[in-house]
Amino acid sequence: MKALLLVFFLLFFVGCTESDSEENPTETPIDDNSSEPTTPQDPIVVEPEPLPSATQNPLYEQQWSINYDPTFYRRNGISTQANINMQDLLETYSGKGIRVAVIDDGFEASHPDMAQNVIATRSVSSTGEVSNGVSHIYSEDHHGTAVAGIIGAANNTIGIMGIASNIELILIQIPMEEYSDAASIRAFDLAQSLGADIINCSWGTGEVTDSLESAMRNVANNGRDGKGIFIVFASGNNDDLMYNDESAVDEVIAVAATDSEGLRAAYSDFGPDLDISAPGGDLLGITTLDPLGSAGSSYDEYLRYDEIQDGYETSFIGTSAAAPILSGALALALEADPTLTRKELLLELQYSATRIGENVPYMYDMISSDGSAPSVYGTFANSGYSDFQVRLKENSTNVVYGPYTVNSLGNNEWVSYISDPVEEGTYTIEVYAQDSTSETIFATDKSYIIHSAYSNALDNKLLRNDFYGYGKVDLFALIQRIKE
Amino acid sequence: MRSVLLLYLTLFCITVNAEDFYYKNNKKVSLTPLDTNATQTRNLQKNRDTRYYMTPQQKVVGVKDEIILSTTKIEKVVQSYDITPLRELAENIYLVRVNDSANTLDMANRLYEDPDVLYAHPNFYKKVQKR
């Protein structure tokens, strides 16, 4: 009997030890073979307690992209339009129950301001081998930590607060110094099998192959039990057309960056595949996490909005910062309604976005036609500047109809009447401006099929622009639409 | 002797003029070979087993002895070609090793043209931009 008691005692002791090890952030509670997300078992229904105030985070004041602090805004000359309009959403939403996978490198999984939200860490080799854990390789290797922190830094009294501060983070390290298609495909598949709802990628190669495109399509369309996983990519920082980039794949949400004036950041890549804009900073950076000690870019564990090291600005700026802001916003929206499919939520995101920009035309991505004289409609973000023209291209290159002038309809709306009879076919419609030296394409509606019986297209109004996509994220408006 | 020289010359010309390409969306994408020491390859990890090419979009890609292909008949495909399967990367997407490593591009293109294969291309090694 005594021996039996001793065995029970030992078993109890071992159980306690295992439980302790799960608190170690480098451990990965998810079984690698498990394809189903675990759900907490809680049979007792209790009223949700109010979330701790965001202001308890000492650096929350600096987080201008999500926090409108009038004093901080005034002191730093930030436009009131620069943030994503959170209002009091952080009192209700924290991303609870939503899983976000960050595919990147330079992860500090044990960062004290994030560790509690990290549920799995994996590394993928260039030939697709998977191992547990993530590691630092280079001293300036901070990127993944900074990206993940914007999404899922915890709500506590240590430093910053992630947009989705109670999220379940999956950190997947890919070999940035020996990147291959195989690593990327395996990483997406892994994210799906670990139950990710959203996958954030703040990088790109500008050269997408059939295999990666098809792997991403499969995840985006069939993941999340068929509701679809959100794949979010940074559009790029070269002030250039997105071309054949990962961010340009149709099923991917491509994010451009806005600055502290609430306008397009000068470096942000653009094009007809751009979906949405979010703050990425320019003169002011996005305050976020930095790996500890010499592993990071700053002398402590944070990259501040005005970080300067050895005379150089080292704050976190770019579409790399804009993408996780959208990923965090999507996590809160999914928390509000987890049943939404990818396409449903994307549509709500597009409708709720704020049309921003100075004298920038947005075009409805549909054409109205009564059969013989189609017209292109659009709106200006601000005043009714109308020095734009419309043209139709075939094969995206040859102008076959136009140019046609843009006429104001009042209330910042415009119309361009296509006066020629247009033959049935597939066209790219462009809104552009031209001066003596160059032309700027503002909005592109690609692969638009014009046919003789088309009408009533304006029932489905969606405005977009090649530099801002459907506009800047407005999270309050998005969640209001979802809750309606 | 002259005929042997002529044969060598012909083979040399074929080699020099042979177009390197891979398939994407049923179209040939040309690849321009680069010297391993070319400045364009500076940011890629150099490896003796890697051949470097420039794509039409001026991106540098590295090719080793690995091919990614998609098929629902992997066993049949592996038996039909001189390749060794390494692992399934995602559903019906496989990484295979080409047993004759000098032949990766050609093998990828032959696989692409096989009706049992949805697509195939080298496992490209690329420079990735953190943004």
Image (tube, coloured by chain):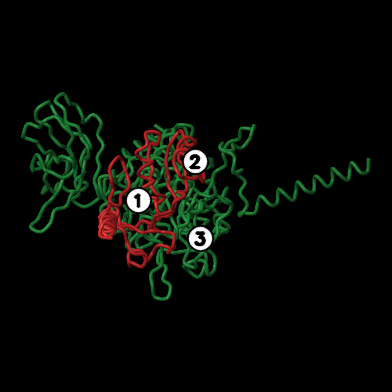
For this orientation, the residue located farthest to the right is A1
Percent from the top left, x then y, of residue A362?
A: 21, 43
Q: Which mark is residue A192?
A: 2
Q: Chain of mark 2?
A: A
Decide if residue A205 is on the left or right side of residue A90. left
Label 1 amino acid? Ala
For this orientation, the residue located farthest to the left is A420
Q: Is residue B61 above or below residue A46?
A: below
Crowding around mark 3 (Cα neighbors within 10 Å: few <14, some 14 to 19, many 20+) is some
Looking at the rendered image, the disc whose residue lies closer to the viewer, 2 or 1, is 2
The alpha-carbon separation of the residues under discs 1 and 3 comes to 23 Å
Q: Could you say whether the residue bearing mark 2 is in a helix, strand or loop? A: helix
The alpha-carbon separation of the residues under discs 2 and 1 comes to 25 Å
Can residue A263 be seen? no
Q: Would you name the residue on which mark 3 appears?
A: A58
Q: Would you name the residue on which mark 1 appears?
A: A278
Q: Earlier in the sequence, mark 3 or mark 2?
A: 3
Looking at the rendered image, the disc whose residue lies closer to the viewer, 3 or 2, is 2
Label 2 amino acid? Gln
The chain displayed red equals B
Question: Looking at the figure, which quarter contains the C terminus of chain A?
Answer: top left
Question: Looking at the figure, which quarter contains the N terminus of chain A?
Answer: top right
Q: Could you say whether the residue bearing mark 1 is in a helix, strand or loop? A: strand
Residues marked 3 and 2 touching at CB (< 8 Å): no
Decide if residue A245 is on the left or right side of residue A129. left
The alpha-carbon separation of the residues under discs 3 and 2 comes to 35 Å
Q: Colour of chain A?
A: green
Q: Which mark is residue A348?
A: none
Q: Which of these two is toward me, A435 or A286? A: A435
Label 3 amino acid? Pro
